[in-house]
Amino acid sequence: MTDICCIGHITRDRIITQNPPMTAHCAGGSAYYMAWAIEKLKNSEGEESQSPSFHMITSVSQEVMPEVDKLRKAGIRVTAFESPTNVFFENKYGENMDNRTQRVLAKSAPFTLDQLKDEQARVYHLGTLLADDFAPEIVEYLASKGDVSIDVQGYLRKVDGEQVKAVEWTDKLRLLKHTAILKVNEWECLTLTGITNPREAAQQIHDWGVREVIVTLGGGGSMILADGKFYETPAFPPAKLVDATGCGDTYSAGYLYARAKGMGYAESGQFAAAMCTLKLEHTGPFAHHIEDVYQVIKKNS
């Protein structure tokens, strides 16, 4: 029985920023960022024997298989199915890192129920990238075996040519009642509910059946609605702002890791926010240890 199973594609990413001016090419995707983040936490001093177990399930082309090899060499348990093509994202940021435009230059094959039927986990985190990554039947099936955690971003975007366009999540009422944990940002909150106030939107999502609603607000921090109460966490300022790609996935990794270790909602939100602060300071996945996370929290307490 795995504590956290993260399912998602590994992407090829082209990242373009204006401040500082930079173009970088690297691997990415929700599952990729989460896997490296949790591995760094597990390898921290004193964490080796008490960390939650983790399993990554992905689908990649042969071109990206070297990234799977790197994960495995680092000690991360990875199951990789072969896809004829691979997701290729271009992420372009404005002066404000909260503003991003995307192009999709290629896609991976969707996951199938047959690929996932033998996995046993306490939490299944679906790192959605595009609307057709997971059929509704997969979510319902996984929810019958454990808690389903969803980063909603992929359900709200589809590819039209190379452009990423916002779409309605037509199955939201069917699937949210099977979702234990949902992470959304402010724009996704509005898109899902039509409600401009994030607190009211979070309450609506909770009323649709989600046990823990996480709303990330960029520079405004984050809030968690659970057990009828809001828990708010400010955004801790980074020493320097380099790249926001994968920041939301880093938050999910920190939150699920903390919850699996028995931390409460407020403590888990702080832990996840501190991880995001460290992630913002460089391009690529989270690359710090757990003592660095607590140092950020202590500095900003």
Image (tube, grey):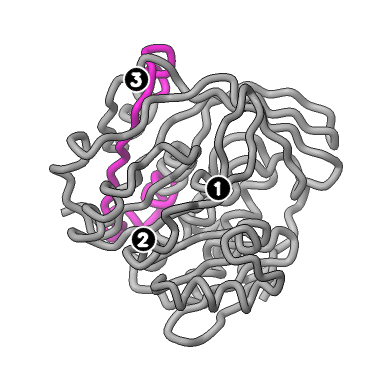
- Tell me the residue at 55%/36% (across/down): 158
113 is within the stretch colored magenta:
no
Stretch in magenta:
39-67
Q: Residue furthest bottom?
A: 228
Q: Position of residue 133 (x, y in %)?
A: 40, 37
Identify the residue at horizontal 42%, vertical 40% (top origin): 31
In the rendered structure, which amino acid carries the disc numbered 2?
Answer: Arg
Image height of 262 relative to 45, above or below: below
Q: Which of marks 2 and 3 is nearer the N terminus?
A: 3
Q: Position of residue 87 (x, y in %)?
A: 49, 25
The N terminus lies in which quarter of the figure?
bottom left
> In the image, what residue occupies the spot 51% across and 60% down?
183
User: Type of residue at label 1?
Assistant: Leu
Please tell me whether mark 1 sits on a helix, a strand or a loop. helix
Of badges 1 and 3, the one in the foreground is 1
In the image, which disc is placed on residue 24?
A: none
Give the label on residue 156, or none.
1
Do tag 1 and tag 2 residues touch (Cβ < 8 Å)?
A: no
Quadrant occupied by the C terminus: bottom right
Cα separation, mark 1 vs mark 2, equals 15 Å
Q: Which residue of the protein is positioned furthest toward the front in this rendering?
A: 170
**41 drawn magenta:** yes
Q: Assess whether mark 3 and mark 1 are in contact (beta carbons under 8 angstroms).
A: no
Q: Which residue is drawn at 67% across and 47% down?
A: 280
* Mark 1 or 3, nearer chain start: 3
Q: Nearer the viewer, mark 2 or mark 3?
A: 2
Residue under pointer 3: 83
Mark 1 to mark 3 CA distance (whole Å)? 23 Å
